[in-house]
Amino acid sequence: MMDVVSYLYETFSSNMMDIPLIAPIVDFLTKIPLINFIVALILWKPFFAVIIMPGLGVMTLYLLYIVWYERKLTARVQWRVGPLEVARPIRGAIQTLADGIRYFFQEAIVHREAHRPYYVQLPILAFIPVLLPIMFIPAGSAVGIYTPYSIQLTVTFIALIPITIVAIGWASNSRFAYIGSVREAFMYFAYEVPFIIAVISMIFLYSSGDAYVAVEKQSAIPGALLNPIAFVVYIIAMLMATSRLPFEIPEADQEIAFGPFVEYSGILFGLVMVLAYEKLYIMTLLFTILFLGGWSGPYCPLLGDLNGPLWMFIKTIVVISILVIVRSIYARYRLDQALRIGWTSMLALSIAALVVGGVIGVWLS
Amino acid sequence: MAREWQFALPEKKHEKKYFGNLKAEVIDAGLCCHCAACASVCPVNGITAGDAPIDFPNWIKECVDCGACIKVCPRWDYTPKSGLGEYIEVTAARSKRFVGQDGAMVTEFTASALEMGLIERAIFVARDSNWRTRIVTIRTPEQLYDRKITGTKYSYADVLPALKDAVLKSEAVGFVGTPCMVTAVRKMQQAFKKFERVKLAIGLFCTENFYHHDLYNFLLEKANADLRNAIKTDIKKGKFIVEMKDGSRVRIPVKDFEEIIPSGCKVCQDFAAVDSDVSVGSVGSANGFSTVMVRTEVAKSILEYIREKDYAEFQEPKLEVVQKLCDHKIKIHPWPPEK
Amino acid sequence: MIRLSKVKTDPVENLKRHAEAIGEAVKQAIKPDRITVEYPRERRRYPECFRGFIVFDKEKCISCFRCAQICPANAIQMEYFDKAYPGIDYAKCIFCHFCVDSCPTGALNTSKVHDVAFKSMDEMRLSARQITRVPEIVREEKQTVEYYVDRNVWKLVRRRELDRLEVPPKPVKVRERKAACTEPESCLGCRLCANVCPQNAIKVEKCEVSIGEEVTGTGCVLQIQTDLCTGCGLCVRQCPMQILTLEEVGE
Amino acid sequence: MEYVLDIPVEPPRELRSLFIPIPPEYVEDTYKSDDFLVLVGPQHPGSGHMRLIVRIKGDIIQEVIPDPGYVHRSMEKIAENRLYIQNIPLVERPAIMDAPNFNLGYVRAIEEALDIEVPERAKYIRTMLAELGRIGTHLYDAAILAVFIGHTTGFMYPFGLRELICEALVRLTGARFTSSFIIPGGVRRNADESTLKWIYDMTLAMERRLKSFERIFVNNPTVIARLQDVGVLSREEAIKYGVVGPFLRASGVEYDVRKIEPYEVYDELVWDMPVSDAGDGYARFLVRVNEIGQSLSIIRQCIKEMPEGRVISDQIAENGKDIRGSFYDSLSNIVLPPGEFTTLTEGARGTIVFSIVSDGESNVPYRLRIVSPGWLYLRGFMESLRGERLADLQAIYGSFGYFPPEADR
């Protein structure tokens, strides 16, 4: 027994995040038995990447931030004030937290017609395809599972997410939810092909599916400038995939009142509501790796290994904060218009991006 | 503009409110002629007329004891008028414009007065499908072409309440009524100056008048004649004639009506509406003509107007027939009534 | 005449429009021209003519029922203490202020109060005593806001002072009028005018009616005491023969 | 090609249980021919207080049957036992955004009956009020259209702008929108100089802000994509189905009551009538956006050319500046001469018909007929939905600015 623990401790401590800032504390804690095991586990790079940063932990912080920020930004554009009454001195910054708490204590109603087990389980199960890509997205030296095919794998697992949403719509067994999931499936068809082709074009460009290769090839010029067409296609596909406006078709408030999630309430609604934001987060992580030079940034010696994840997180947040303004700019396209855009202009653009990626990739190598 | 004025209170015969007096002296004594003058002047609109004897439900509470009803009642201190009365001119005429009971001279007079501008509106009695009386206000001669307005109805009508509203609304009013109504209006004009706006009072030759329900039931059971599909009622030569839609006529001698004659009519001796401006009736003229007895200058002027416009054709009346009927009425309605 | 037609939707135009829209949004995001009034903390300054809750001046009221009769919503019912005074049912009131405009003496006036909370429907029926002053409300605001517009500016100016909610009563040219009888000869003698007069200004006393010398009977003398008469016109509306009027006196 | 399922589909339960104003044979026939009946409303966020019975084949609307009347308040009957003057707050209620126009139409009918001569200044103030109401209504409809097609900013901006209209009405009349300000013989109160100047500046400021609204919503490509070529009513159809107001002008018919039979000072002012020949949803919206600009210029001209003098006709009150104190005596016992008096008014959403029948004796109308524009263009609205996609129903709805309370009265 003990040797298993000691063996694990050895493996953890051999591959620990080296952060000079908190090194003394870590040294002190490693003296204490059993605590040192926990500390080693937390600072073990795969665990750190997946659970702490850029994984689950900071994703929660990001959710708390982005929901509030989106509302504030929209309000600002719309001559309003936005959420304010919760914690007035900090301009209602903890509004999302308050909402989350309210969702938590609100009654979660499961209506009679719903397919009860799936209806209750799916919001939790939906986290699996959201978290799987993080295993393969490296952040600096911190990486869950290292493979040379990390980008492909990430895209593959991202493609799983709509299935859970469709399943949610099916499980809640209501007309609006049904229409919503059908629309979700249509949007899936609309954006998936251009999105994957855009990613493949970048893989051509870096001539490798390895995130590390992609990042170090961007050390000179970021991918956004190397292949701007793919950049644009990726952004639009990201808007479609995460059902932001103008492609907020699956969950159109005025037409089908939140679409697949219409029946949910309480904490379950809280879970399904943030699905789109989590998806946005994952896709933006990939976006930063592909186009913005991933974790590369000014190196701060005090942070040591933390540099990579931190820079990646910062870039992600900045990108998302810029992206969410489209909510206050655009109206909603019709479904057939969105499909037409996906299959005509975006497909053409993505193929052009493929060509550009191939050419530049040849020129780079 | 007077800030101080006075009004007279008639003396009471009993120690009750004034309506109590009226009830004791007139209504319960069986003298009431159902002219509804009291109902028209009652300031609290408590007195009810209609197809029932005059009454004031809980007058003990609601009557404000003003005595107006007594001032206008034609049967208070009743002394019957009778005879032909004084007149300026008598003629028999038939209107060329209107179709009426006989000569339609009542309609003709009203229309001419409206055209001359003597009166602004006239109160007429129309009937509904089963011959219940209904008050209509005539403002233009065109309204008079309605066949339901012309023609005689032998049942009571609340002309005077409508007359009061008309008086309050407009400056010059004319109306058509039975002799008792005309007498009542004259008393009103004595008592209250405002009623001098009644410029034209057309009296009808009248023997009796009936409550509608009495008449209806009587005809139904006596002659099995349903007034609902009657088109004309008339009294000719002592016969009450009901003309039906299908052209059949029902004749009932007037004497049989004795049982349904209201008590008020049994003490009335005024046949020719002696107080009116002009009295009109079928008696005393050839068939299809009406006798017209012009009594005042106003009516005279209207007659002249009709003559010059040639609205009517004229004839010599047989005045002795009218005289005979006056005497006959005095005979059958003695005063004081013998018990 | 302005002729409009289909707008062109070629990609170039669309790109320009996209750019315009995004530029506008970014401009607003950077420098928002915000027009939100944070209501409970700051209150808008309303003009003097604002139609708010109605304030009633008991001294000026002559209980003429005009307010109650003109009210389109039947929200005003008169209550009798010493005289008849209007009480307003704010569950029905639509704030058209016909009553305020109808009041011949300016006894009803407006105020700037527009936000009163009632606990129940019964509380909303305010009696005449309750509306003699501005209803007291909880004022959380610290400052007063006003829209300031200009040829190219449109902003909220905030002043750190509280707005007075009472409006100084607007003067009304009171027309001195007294009841009078136009046609004494056609008086029914019903004395309804005397009964209805809120001031008991119409005196009735028995007398003897005489034509020339000889006494024909008893009667009554009606006298309108002009010092008491307020010219409310209730008797005019009550008279069954419509022989009473209001006539102007003085100036 | 078209795929036809040969699965027999039963009509759903609610089509038999609920009250639907269509015969059951129609339902059976619909479901035999592989169509479906979709009930939109009356609680649906995309339809007002009215139910639309939509017959769809696949995603294409075959036919729409309206089921209005959920907010019917029997206004015409209520008006028959109120004084003429007491009806003024009542006739404002059908469309509270458009209150001044409704008020004006009713009052003009009364003035036509009593032939009251309205003073010049009062006419200018009335025109100004009517135009303010028109702007407010157009902005409101634009906001509803925006929220129907999911543009939240397009919802917030017009309501922000409407706040200024309400402020102007407050300064002018004392109430935010249902300002029963127009009375027979003029208006209730004179407008002082500071208020007029404020409104003048307001129009300029609003024009400036309208530009940003146009940039972000009116010229927005997504909006154009949603509304262009959707719900097209050709000129002939529009005339055939009796569409009125801006929606008729959007189909290329140059008809505006203010031009055809000018009623207040419209014939003395310089303004244009925006007419579009597209006839689709975007044209209907664009015409109204242009009308806002015209109304602003009309208001400016009114303030510039407003003469001094009385605002209440001397036939009504001797105090020409303020009705206060003599309201009851001069207006409570209006009695119209016998006859029928009809006026046409160009409301924001179209032609308003007021027809008063009077018996010449009573002080209440014998009959008051209100024909509101919403009711007039309902048919055209339904026809324009034919052959569109189901997702476009809300867009067309918003492009018509249909307002059930106004139509149901």
Image (cartoon, grey):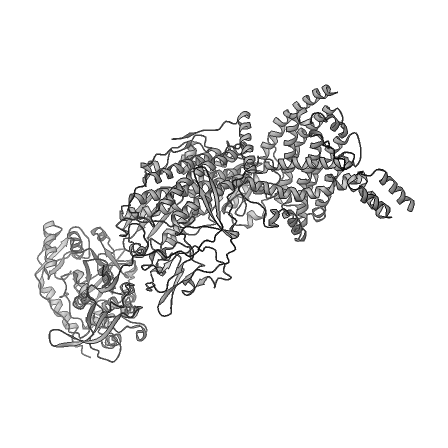
Q: Position of residue C234 (x, y in %)?
A: 29, 64
Q: Residue furthest bottom?
A: B15
Q: Position of residue D280 (x, y in %)?
A: 47, 33
Q: Position of residue C166 (x, y in %)?
A: 42, 57
Quadrant in the picture for residue B214: bottom left
**Residue ID at (72%, 24%):** A205
Residue B202, compared with residue D191, is above or below; it is below
Q: Is residue C175 left or right of residue D55?
A: left
Q: State the count of labels.
A: 0
Residue A301, compared with residue B220, is above or below; it is above
Residue A343, compared with residue B258, is above or below; it is above
Can residue D327 be seen here? yes
Can residue A126 be seen here? no
Nearer to me, D146 or D367: D146
Quadrant in the picture for residue A75: top right
**Residue ID at (82%, 44%):** A39
Q: Is residue A95 left or right of residue A10?
A: left
- Give the quadrant of the N terminus of chain B: bottom left
Q: Position of residue B239 (x, y in %)?
A: 20, 64
Nearer to me, A223 or D136: A223
- Give the quadrant of the C terminus of chain B: bottom left
Nearer to me, A295 or C223: A295
